[in-house]
Image (cartoon, rainbow, N blue to C red):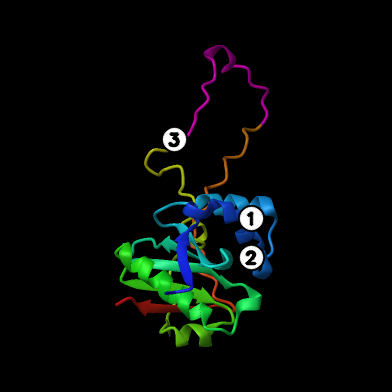
Amino acid sequence: MNRYELLPLYHRQDLNQSCINLLNQEWPRSDGSREHSQSKSCRLTPPMSFLFIEKDTDRLIGHARICLLPNRPTSCWIESVIVERSCRGLGLGKLLMASLEDAAKGFGFDEAFLCTDDQVIFYERCGYMKCDPILHSTTATSVFPVTSSSAKGSFTPSVSIPSSLSCLTTGAPPPPPPAPPKKATTAPISTVGHQYMCKKLT
């Protein structure tokens, strides 16, 4: 019988504080910020967080999150993968990834992407290959900037001047015309220090 199980955070919200503490081992943030992030992924469909738990002790061992990818309905994004420091080097990271990939396939995903700073060798051992950068949830806001006022559904408010005031001129030169609107630009995806990787889920 497997000693470990992967469960949605949604089913083990009693471990949310332990999960926050675990994530802050690697990526320190305030509890409030972390709770806000966790609340958005405390779901039963992606984007969702998973907890990797030792059954006998009910101890939280690891965490990972599956997210959706823009314009890639059959692919998912994996992030926030972590194993408790005292449990590393025991093969639990690979077991966590295998369980996570099984969960991803259960949602109909056939490909997984991720990004790492210093765990390329680990993910290669899990079957991942280096790939070009892709758009994912944390880059979407920079790659898709706010559209200009000419976009569908937007409007430009106008102010009408009463006719009784239209003749009250002082001879002063008219105000300069408004500056032309800035063109929206697409920000490149930052890849400094990051390696994107992918794997076919079969």
Viewer-proximal residue, 141 or 137? 137
Q: Position of residue 61 (x, y in %)?
A: 57, 69
Give the Cα separation between the discs numbered 3 and 2: 46 Å
Is residue 164 shown left or right of residue 112?
Answer: right
Q: Can you say whether 178 is above or below 43 in the image?
A: above
Give the Cα separation between the discs numbered 3 and 1: 44 Å
Give the Cα separation between the discs numbered 2 and 1: 9 Å
Is residue 155 shown left or right of residue 106?
Answer: right
Q: Which residue is denoted by mark 3 in the rendering?
A: 155
Q: Helix, strand or loop at disc 3? A: loop
Q: Which residue is denoted by mark 2 in the rendering?
A: 22
Q: Position of residue 92 (x, y in %)?
A: 52, 78
Q: Helix, strand or loop at disc 1? A: helix
Q: Over which residues does the magenta segment extend?
A: 156-172
Q: Can you say whether 22 is above or below 170 in the image?
A: below
Please indicate, yes or no, whether residue 133 appears anywhere in the rendered image.
no
Query: Which residue is at a point 50% across and 74% down the rendered structure image?
Result: 115
For disc 2, the neighbor class at 10 Å (few under 14, some 14 to 19, many from 20) is many
Query: Which residue is at a point 58% across and 56% down the rendered structure image?
Result: 15
Viewer-proximal residue, 17 or 172? 17
Amino acid carrying label 1: it is Gln
Q: Mark 2 and 1 residues: CB-CB less than 8 Å, in contact?
A: no
Please indicate, yes or no, whether residue 21 appears anywhere in the rendered image.
yes
Q: Position of residue 181 (x, y in %)?
A: 52, 48
Q: Position of residue 27 (x, y in %)?
A: 65, 67
Indicate whether residue 161 is drawn in magenta.
Answer: yes
Q: Earlier in the sequence, mark 3 or mark 2?
A: 2
Q: Which residue is denoted by mark 1 in the rendering?
A: 17
Viewer-proximal residue, 74 or 168? 74
Amino acid carrying label 2: it is Leu
Q: Quadrant of the C terminus?
A: bottom left
